[in-house]
Amino acid sequence: MSNNISIQDLDKLLKANEEGTISLPKPEMELIQKWKNGETIDKRYNSIIKLDIKQLEEKNSLDEKLDNEFTTFCENAKTKSPQEILNSAYEITVKEEIKDSLKSMELYPLEVSALLKQKDILSEFYHDWLNVDTPLGEVLENSIQESIAMVTRYYKSNSKER
């Protein structure tokens, strides 16, 4: 193993692929398995594997960011009066749905990067969804996808300006 790619990293990639966290092409999975088993692999594949590891780490960071945002929102809600908590129950439910949907979606690396840079994703997506004014479920996912596209376009335009 060379260039700081550990067996643990390879195991994480294979596990994430198996769980559906990331989606690796079959030839790449076979290559990782061979490398993990000690076979010598052409050095040009190092960058591919490193990119996969980076994408997995970013996806995990996004999942953690979403969990933290939701936990912070819920903890803040607990400091409110019982009536205020009841009034925010709908928002809590929708934000949890948004969080769970985002965590289970297959996102492009650019989308993940854009979401990682975005502040307060759950609130923004919640307000985007309120503007659509549709019931929870499949339509929520459409609203989320539209919000992702908007955040990604903004991220790309800001990246070009730098």
Image (cartoon, grey):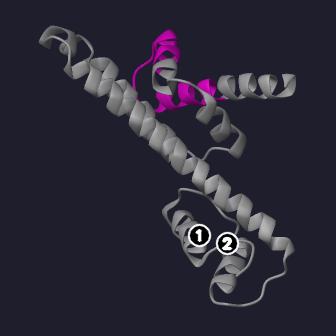
* 124 to the left or right of 55: left
Single out the residue that lies furthest toward the left: 82
Q: Mark 1 sits on what residue?
A: 9
Classify residue 98 by image quadrant. top left
Callouts 1 and 2 close, C-beta under 8 Å: yes
Give me the residue at 73% from left, 59% from top. Answer: 51
Residue 83 placement (x, y as % from top left): 15, 9
Q: Is residue 138 above or below residue 34?
A: above
Stretch in magenta: 126-148
User: Is residue 158 or residue 104 the one in the foreground?
Assistant: 158
Of 86 and 75, which appears nearest the observer? 75
Q: Is residue 27 left or right of residue 44?
A: left
The prevailing secondary structure element of the residues shown in magenta is: helix
Q: Tell me the residue that label 2 is attached to.
A: 5
Rendered image quadrant of residue 40 = bottom right
Q: Which mark is residue 96?
A: none
**Mark 2 neighbour class, 10 Å CA radius: few under 14, some 14 to 19, many 20 or more:** some
Q: What amino acid is labelled 2 in the image?
A: Ile
